Image (cartoon, rainbow, N blue to C red):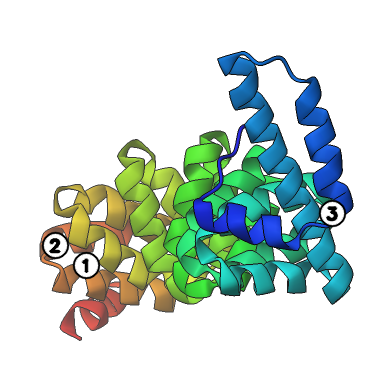
Amino acid sequence: MLRTLSLLSAAMLASQVSHVAMAQDASSNEVAQPTTSVSIESSAEASNRFQTAFLRRQVDQTMSVGRAISSIAGHYPQEIVSIVDIALDTYPDKYREIVFAAISAQPSSTEEIVQLAIEKEVSSCPNIVQLAIKAEPTYVDFVVHAAAVSTPEELDEIVRVAVLTQPDAADSIVQTLSQEHPNKIVEIMTSALNAVPFVGEYVVDALLAVFPNEAQMVVETAVRESSHQREQVIRILSTAQHAGVSQDKLKEYAMSAGLSEEDFNSAVSN
């Protein structure tokens, strides 16, 4: 991957990298052919070497790649993705420390950092999702979006891990991913409710807000997946009633879940 540096980064790196590293770069550049394409490539490679040398210098000074990432992000936030790119190549076994420190220091770059870590295959997609959410829970929607775009074949596992890691955001997670994958609402709901059963009413409320025409599918799925938990079914039916689902339909769903007439009346009377 070719990386370009801002003038600020170039100035920063030039002032920090040792004279030995710069001398080696100069020597290498003298050998390059003076064609335009080679010059551009040599410039990109030199920039890459500058950044790598600068990162190593910071790691040596702080004795920790995580602290080095945090320090660089504090001074040069616009370069955090580029630095993470190099850090994951240079210290792949420290990916947890790198990703956690980078997202914690620069949350607005969460999506790009997650995509980069997945692209480099430093760990499995679900592991990266869990790590990123723990680093910055409020950016969970950006994390699951990036993960689902990068590895859509792992959507069910992404949902499961995300909901388990941040159950309070289950409704938002399911809503975000269902809007991006409307043909997989049932699979997304099922993964979420199997992972954390008590979020059923919140998931139903979130989905009915954006898919009012899919009420039957949403409520039926929630009731089916929660049928072994009477209190959950009652809360789901009550939520669906408040969202405008007809009482006849609600009774149909309740009976299919094995609720008694008394339980159904209790749910819709609240």
Q: Amino acid at mark 2?
A: Val
> Split into 4 quadrants, where in the image is the N terminus?
top right
Q: Mark 1 or mark 3, which has the lower sequence index?
A: 3
The label nearer to you, 1 versus 3, is 3
Q: Is residue 22 left or right of residue 37?
A: right
Q: Within 10 Å of the Cα at label 1, are there few (<14), some (14-19), or many (20+) other Cα atoms? A: many
Q: Position of residue 133 (x, y in %)?
A: 57, 67
Classify mark 3: helix, strand or loop: helix
In the picture of the structure, the residue carrying the numbered disc 1 is: 240
Q: Position of residue 52 (x, y in %)?
A: 77, 49
In the picture of the structure, the residue carrying the numbered disc 2 is: 245
Q: Amino acid at mark 3?
A: His
User: Tags 1 and 2 in contact by the CB under 8 Å rule?
Assistant: yes
Classify mark 2: helix, strand or loop: loop
CA separation in Å, label 1 and label 2 = 6 Å
Q: Position of residue 110 (x, y in %)?
A: 52, 60
Q: Amino acid at mark 1?
A: Ala
Q: Mark 1 or mark 2, which has the lower sequence index?
A: 1
* Quarter occupied by residue 161: bottom right
User: Tags 2 and 3 in contact by the CB under 8 Å rule?
Assistant: no
The tag on residue 19 is 3
Kindly give the residue lying farthest to the bottom in the view shown.
270
Q: Is residue 222 above or below residue 236?
A: above
> Split into 4 quadrants, where in the image is the C terminus?
bottom left
- In this orientation, which residue lies closer to the viewer: 3 or 35? 35
